[in-house]
Amino acid sequence: MNRRIERIIFDALLEADGKVLAPNGENFQFYNWTNAVNREEEVIELTMRNFCMMTDNAVYDSLKYSKIEKVRNILDIVERRFQNSKIYQTVSHWSVAEKPDKKTIKAAIMKCAQELSPDEKRDFYKKYGTDFELREEDFKIQIISIDWGKGEDNPVSRVYFFSKYNMDATWKEEQTNWMMPKTFRDVKLSVLCKRHDDTTFEKLRICCEKYDAMRT
């Protein structure tokens, strides 16, 4: 749930990036922190100064009182989603071995939509009264990676153990690996539907089923 709410806020800030003013009157860049890396000292200083102003209230007010109507509308959409509990819906989710590329997954799902047979499209039209037209902006790919702090590696392998009977003797986890799990990172891939209508959700569900069959 928290991840889906974060995704909505992230999309809103990304859309408003560079279109609002910070409390000091300067252009408020929400996501230009990476541009400051390895840049001249003045750029880094300005970026950090803007970062220090990014309180919840400052961000909210910069959107709400923006002179650009499109930016104000972005905040209205976010608020309506929360008030009406219209957060992104999870269509499908899988555990995957490696951390995949989001663009690759989205392209694969769109390909599944394009490769639907005429009979499948006809059945969909009969049931929902609309053509099967899935758009990229209708859904998001979310990837959550949970590990023990060292990615795929076992963090205990870096630890030396001592014997209480002989403090000069040490060993590593290899001698006790029967206690350890086989993997140390869990990657979850989810497809989130941004629209709140049954037809879009059903389109995504059908495509996700096809994608799941293809990837396995």
Image (tube, rainbow, N blue to C red):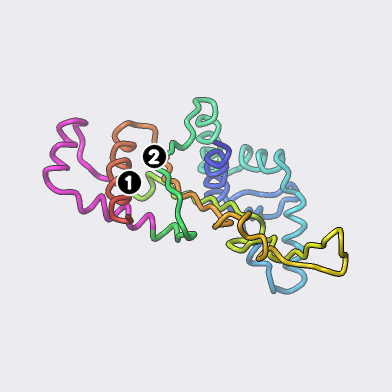
The residue sitting at 17% across, 35% down in the picture is 125
Amino acid identity at mark 1: Cys
Q: Can residue 115 be found in the magenta stretch?
A: yes
| Magenta-drawn stretch, dominant element (helix, strand or loop) | helix
Give residue 91's mark: 2
Amino acid identity at mark 2: Val
Picture coordinates of residue 15, whole percent (x, y): 52, 49
The residue sitting at 15% across, 36% down in the picture is 123
Q: Mark 1 points at which residue?
A: 208
Give SS at disc 1. Answer: helix
Range drawn in magenta = 105-134
Q: Can residue 7 be found in the magenta stretch?
A: no
For label 1, the crowd category at 10 Å Cα-Cα, with few meaning under 14, some 14 to 19 and many 20 or more, is many
Left or right: residue 139 versus residue 132 is right
The residue sitting at 34% across, 37% down in the picture is 201
Q: In which quarter of the image is the N terminus?
A: top right
The image quadrant of residue 66 is top right
Give SS at disc 2. Answer: strand
Q: Which of 50 and 130 is in front in this view?
A: 130
Is residue 11 visible in this depiction of the protein? yes
